[in-house]
Amino acid sequence: MFDVLTFVYDHYAAGTAYPKLGHIERQLQGVGFERTQVEAALSWLHGLDSAAHPSPLKPWLVQPDPSSVRIYPAREQAQLGSRALRFIQFLESAGALPAHMREVVIERATAAAGQPTALNDLKIIILMVYWRFGYEPDALVLDELCDDTSQRVPH
């Protein structure tokens, strides 16, 4: 599914409009992604759309209290894993992940298959959330999200 999401981000994020899921589906099938991957990605994107448009039934997505402290229940800790949790904390402390978007990232990460969430998969989720909310991170944060840290050489 993350290969499909990466393709969607690479091909649509540069535009100003968020395309309809039907258009994305036709494009993905035309490119040759497996039907099960496309369906999983579209379901995930539909969930992202729902989270990006809060309703009275989801008031916690609107804006968590800035003075609140986020406590991760055991289920989220297991799903996200320590590397993903540290990365989320890093982005929050850098001011690059507002609280309401953090909640969407966590919700979308727990909606994805796999446990714990791989750091590269989490980065794709964060990029997708940024894109859906129309949030453009600064160049250093974008570099951190797009950089493959496995290729880094320590000095």
Image: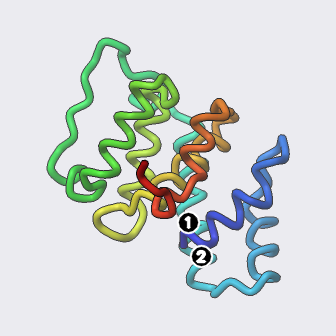
Residue at 60% across / 34% down in the picture? 140
72 horizontally vs 97: left or right:
left
Q: Amino acid at mark 2?
A: Glu
Which class describes the residues within 10 Å of circle 2: few (<14), some (14-19), or many (20+)? some
Residue depicted at x 75% and y 82%: 29
Residue 11 position by quadrant: bottom right
Identify which amino acid the numbered label 1 is placed on.
Ser
Q: Position of residue 17 (x, y in %)?
A: 82, 44
Residue named by callout 2: 39
| Residue found 84% across the figure and 41% down from its top | 16
Would residue 135 be visible to someone looking at this image?
no
Q: Please state the horizontal and vertical placement of residue 8, each as a whole percent of the image.
A: 71, 63
Whether label 1 touches label 2, CB < 8 Å: yes
The structure residue drawn at horizontal position 54% and vertical position 59%, both measured from the top left corner, is: 148
> Residue reaching furthest top?
67
Residue 43, labelled with which disc? Answer: 1
Of residues 155 and 74, the one drawn nearer to the viewer in this rendering:
155
Residue 105 in view of the camera: yes
For residue 15, the mark is none
Residue 63 location, x and y as percent? 45, 22
In three-dimensional space, the C-alpha distance between marks 1 and 2, rounded to whole angstroms, equals 6 Å
The furthest residue to the left? 74
> Is label 1 in a helix, a strand or a loop?
helix
